[in-house]
């Protein structure tokens, strides 16, 4: 059952609950720490502290992805919103970084007088904050926001699209899904759209190991703090006693899989108690917990992935240093 709230006359918030059978944070953590090798899902990075640390990451010179994508949008956004023929509405997976979303909204409102923007985000608070700021900034904008997990929202068929739609999956978010999950997400997105609708897909390009590993292990230690925060979150929410300082952040580019993998490596052997889960976990010295995969792509791989959702390539743009790609794909 979805819950609709009219926050203002131009901002409606639709809450989509978790579907049954989806594991909770506690179940996922228990399963991941009992697994061999140990793992924690990167989706749990983003509590309030983790989101603030990720924000700081996007401003680091080593984490070039955000600036590179912003440059592509600044250079080519005018073309992106016009290639589908106005008027369009936007559907974004993610509540949108202020700068990038505003760039495209601004461009669209130069080409048409009205725009409906539908962000989907797990965080109701992030949605509320960014949506209120957007309707205030743009008189021609209406926001219909969906609070929930991308998969739950798309599977619930709660998304209402009245006009031709340009969907957006930006910021290399697709890179955090294992390939099978990424294909499933694109299939669901393809199902939600109609033939002729578009998808802007922002993905990081394959490149040399040194650049990639530095982007995910900055010398100032912000990414290390971001990674370790997941253990602090487990301590806070599941009454556990990880000694966070015993874990070193490791980023390794696995060239065969095309993924930068992040791990937390125990310096010394440890026994951790998770009281809420009634669970004890043993780690050997040097043992790693896998915390994130960040996949990198070639242009051909992006096109092949999008094809699984029924999308055909229409146009693609790179930043001036060829580090990051934004593809426009059209639902067939
Ligand atoms: C959100 N996501 C696309 C980021 C990435 O590049 O995989 C998360 C991140 N992890 C470490 N640094 C940034």
Image (cartoon, helix red, strand yellow):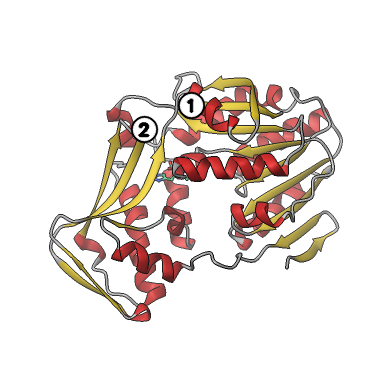
Q: Is residue 27 visible?
A: yes
Q: Could you give the CA–CA distance between mark 1 and mark 2, rounded to whole angstroms? A: 11 Å
Residue 253 against residue 156 in the figure, above or below: above
Name the quadrant where ligand 1 sits: top left
Q: Which mark is residue 202?
A: none
Q: Residues within 10 Å of mark 2 (few under 14, many from 20)?
A: some
Q: Nearer the viewer, residue 324 or 20?
A: 20
Left or right for 247, reference 94: left
Left or right for 93, reference 26: right
Left or right for 317, reference 114: left
What percent of the width, then of the height, locates residue 155?
Answer: 66, 54
Quadrant where the N terminus is found in the figure: bottom right
Left or right for 41, reference 327: left
Quadrant where the C terminus is found in the figure: top right
Q: Residues within 10 Å of mark 1 (few under 14, many from 20)?
A: few
What percent of the width, then of the height, locates residue 86?
Answer: 82, 28
Q: Residue at x 13, y 62 (%)?
A: 268
Q: Which residue is mark 1?
A: 301
Q: Which residue is mark 2?
A: 258
Residue 284 against residue 138 in the figure, above or below: below
What percent of the width, then of the height, locates residue 210?
Answer: 27, 29
Q: Residue at x 36, y 37 (%)?
A: 259
Q: Is residue 58 visible?
A: no
> Could you tell me which secondary element the residue under label 1 belongs to?
helix
What percent of the width, then of the height, locates residue 151?
Answer: 60, 53
Residue 211 against residue 239 in the figure, above or below: above
Dividing the picture into quadrants, the one containing residue 3 is: bottom right
Marks 1 and 2: CB-CB under 8 Å? yes
Q: Residue at x 64, y 45 (%)?
A: 188
> Could you tell me which secondary element the residue under label 2 belongs to?
loop
Q: Residue at x 61, y 28 (%)?
A: 73
């Amino acid at each position: 059952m979805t819950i609709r709230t009219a926050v203002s006359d131009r901002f409606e918030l639709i809450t989509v609950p978790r579907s049954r059978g989806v594991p909770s944070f506690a179940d996922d953590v228990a399963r991941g720490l009992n697994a061999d090798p140990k793992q924690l899902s990167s989706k749990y990075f983003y509590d309030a502290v983790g989101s603030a640390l990720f924000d700081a990451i996007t401003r680091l010179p080593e984490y070039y992805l955000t600036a590179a994508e912003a440059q592509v949008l600044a250079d080519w956004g005018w073309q992106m919103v016009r290639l589908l023929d106005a008027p369009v509405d936007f559907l974004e997976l993610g509540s949108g970084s202020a700068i990038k979303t505003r760039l495209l909204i601004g461009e669209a409102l130069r080409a048409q007088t009205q725009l409906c923007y539908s962000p989907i985000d797990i965080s109701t608070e992030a949605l509320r904050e960014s949506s209120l700021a957007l309707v205030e900034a743009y008189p021609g904008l209406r926001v219909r926001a969906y609070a929930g997990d991308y998969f739950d929202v798309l599977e619930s068929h709660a998304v209402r699209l009245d006009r031709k739609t340009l969907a957006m999956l930006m910021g290399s978010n697709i890179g955090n899904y294992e390939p099978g999950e990424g294909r499933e997400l694109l299939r669901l997105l393809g199902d939600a759209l109609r033939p002729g609708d578009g998808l802007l897909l922002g993905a990081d390009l394959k490149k040399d190991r040194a650049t990639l590993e530095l982007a995910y292990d900055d010398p100032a230690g912000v990414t290390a703090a971001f990674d370790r925060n997941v253990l602090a979150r487990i301590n806070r929410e599941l009454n556990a006693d990880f000694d966070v300082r015993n874990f070193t952040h490791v980023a390794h580019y696995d060239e065969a899989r095309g993924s930068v993998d992040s791990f937390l490596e125990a310096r010394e052997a440890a026994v951790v108690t998770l009281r809420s889960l009634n669970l004890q976990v043993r780690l050997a010295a040097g043992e790693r917990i896998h915390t994130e995969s960040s996949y990198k792509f070639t242009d051909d791989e992006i096109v092949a992935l999008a094809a699984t959702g029924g999308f055909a390539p229409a146009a693609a743009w790179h930043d001036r240093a060829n580090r990051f790609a934004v593809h426009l794909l059209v639902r067939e």
